[in-house]
Amino acid sequence: MKLKSTIRYCFFTYWILSSFSYHSFAQQSTLKDAFKGKFYMGTALSREQFLGFNTRAKEIVKMHFNAIVAENCMKSMYLQPEEGKFFFEDSDKFVEFGENNNMYITGHTLIWHSQIPRWFFEDESGNDVSSEILIERMKQHIHAVVGRYKGKIKGWDVVNEAILDNGEWRDSKFYQIIGKEFVNLAFQFAHEADPDAELYYNDYSMALEGRRNGVVKMVKSLQEQGIRIDGIGMQGHVDMDSPSIEDFEKSIIDFSNLGVKVMITELDLSALPSPWSNMGANISDIAEYQEKIDSYSNGVIPRDAERKWEERYLDFFRLFLKHQDKITRVTLWGISDANSWKNDFPIRGRTDYPLLFDRNYDAKPIVQKLIEQATHQNGCSMKTPVYLVPDDYMADPAVHVFEDRLYIYPSHDRESGIPENDSGDHFDMNDYHAFSMEDINGEITDHGVVLKVEDIAWAGRKLWDCDVAFKTGRYYMYFPLKDKTDIFRIGVAVSDKPYGPFIPEKRPVPGSYSIDPAIFEENGQHYMYFGGIWGGQLQRYRNNKALESAVLPADNEPALCSKVVRLSDDMLEFAEEPRDVVILDETGKPLTQGDTERRFFEASWMHKYKGKYYYSYSTGDTHLLCYAIGDNPYGPFTYQGVILTPVVGWTTHHAIAEYKGKWYLFHHDCIPSGGKTWLRSLKVVELEYNEDGTIKTIDGGGH
């Protein structure tokens, strides 16, 4: 069934304010403001634009963009049309424009097989020069250009389009004369000229598997040789049919896994069909004019077609927002349809509509839609927590994105009649539900009971905090449950759907103990974090062995740690012995058991943000939700601060998830039940990061 989420009904005062101010906000909000803190919003500039001949274009750039790249004036045929004779007048004006408007300036491009003067490769007789001469010409060109703008241009497209769709090297003059080493040399020369500038490789059709793999191989080779490369530019010359969002995302992830920045460069979305299956930008590929693929040649695109085009743009930006921790810049290849290169490519004389501003330099509806998408202006801002399931008691959320939906797996609280005690016997859950959402502001679907105690052969009682993982077409639910001897074990149940039902294994995971399993996946490996003291029984174990009696460390001794373990390939067992999750203080020493406002108690969770691993947990009896940061999934982790101050109630179980470009904290409190700690209600609130990667503390509204 579908429950009307109270997310759809923001607080009354917020509704009044947003209704009153929406139109003025819409008129004043800009692209660069909407995406601030996520990535730079950039555009390519033509000569007439940065020189100010087109005043309307200049106004748009200053209003909406905070990053620029030169469309043509920094290519070698314009900068050095004759050997040793440089023409810097236009490029100087371009850089001056960027500096005067406090913009991130990218130099495009140093080494490219196209738009390069013939003298670069030829001697006086018109024959190919030797590799030594070409290398020297490369060096002189790069040193002169990069050196001139040292400290002014922040990053350079050092090499452009050296790899083919099949992953092989392009047979350019650079490759024919020097071999693949020309790429190494170009990056080496650029670094020599400006050691502080970022250095990028830029290419089109980067969503194709062959080109993706070829670029990955090339970048790894550079890295293995100690050659600096800081980022990969994925040209975004896309159309209505290709590439798929899934393939584009694969490339973003694979490139980011190389440890480099990812930039979306040269973005434009053709509204017209392509004469071939081509996402490219090879300017020599020109097709003959065909009226059937120049559908809107009168300069007007029908509104129905424009809406489909808008949704395609929004899909790409949803992807960019989803991976904002990997993407540093999104750059449109131009400002207005009036002067887009796509009007003549891949078919000369064709009228296209690929950019955000129309032929009169007026903003298309997509501009405001992108702003709203980035700021969630269409719905609640989530700055204030709201309840997700108002008609039932749900707690301990585990949250993941499966099949492009947000799935939530909470504990299901109930009134059991058991008196409260420190062992938590009054938390006596006996089933799990699964919930899902397509939009954080929309309806939440209750998929019903997906696992219950009576289905589990080894069950005693108490289904506490669970989590779910996905691998090779199957979904695995991990749950803590007391066995028939009243000892907590961790079980696993399997389904071929994210919404269950989940079929439990006949036995618990061998060697498992305690509570609160949380699963983190990276590069196909799955790690389980688990453990909780007091009722969670962690104090009954040391070095993964049961003690004769429970023992907590003394206040001045290192605190009892939660555990982390890598799972086996079949996801049903531990692949190793569980390890301690060590949390260090600011001096590098492990937190002590007496440090009750910082030490671990229960409710582990792990997420990754901008290359760092964030381990979050509850301090239990001091009611804080804290976090620590490390460099790998095993830790150690250094304590950073408080995510959530105490809520109404006792526990602070939680999940942190990214969805459609924003981060959210899912947790619970006991306000709807009047403070009954065992009857909790599921909540969500937006999670925000400071520029240094620390998390902004959220007021839990409790003690």
Image (spheres, rainbow, N blue to C red):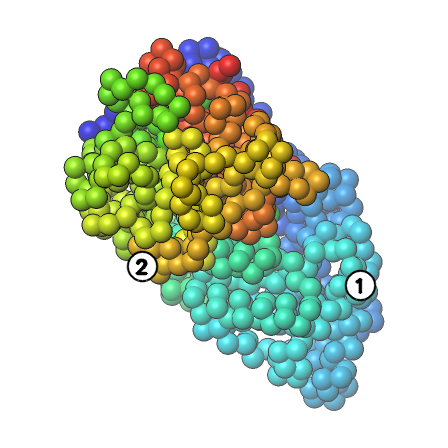
327 left or right of 392 in image: right
Count of picture labels: 2
Answer above or below: position of 649 versus 634.
above
Q: Residue at x 52, y 62 (%)?
A: 204
Q: Position of residue 550 (x, y in %)?
A: 43, 36
382 left or right of 402 in image: right
- The span from disc 2 to disc 1 (Cα, nearest Å) is 51 Å
Quadrant in the rendering for residue 401: top left
Disc 1 marks which amino acid?
A: Ala
Q: Residue at x 66, y 72 (%)?
A: 225
Q: Check if mark 2's residue and mark 1's residue have beta carbons within 8 Å.
A: no
Q: Residue at x 75, y 63 (%)?
A: 191
Q: Position of residue 700 (x, y in %)?
A: 49, 20
Quadrant of image for the N terminus: top left
Q: Pick the residue in front: 306 or 608.
A: 608
Q: Earlier in the sequence, mark 2 or mark 1?
A: 1
Q: Nearer the viewer, mark 2 or mark 1?
A: 2
Disc number at residue 193? 1
Disc 2 marks which amino acid?
A: Asp
281 left or right of 415 in image: right
Residue at numbered disc 2? 570
Badge 1, how many Cα within 10 Å: few under 14, some, many 20+? many
Q: Position of residue 462 (x, y in %)?
A: 27, 32
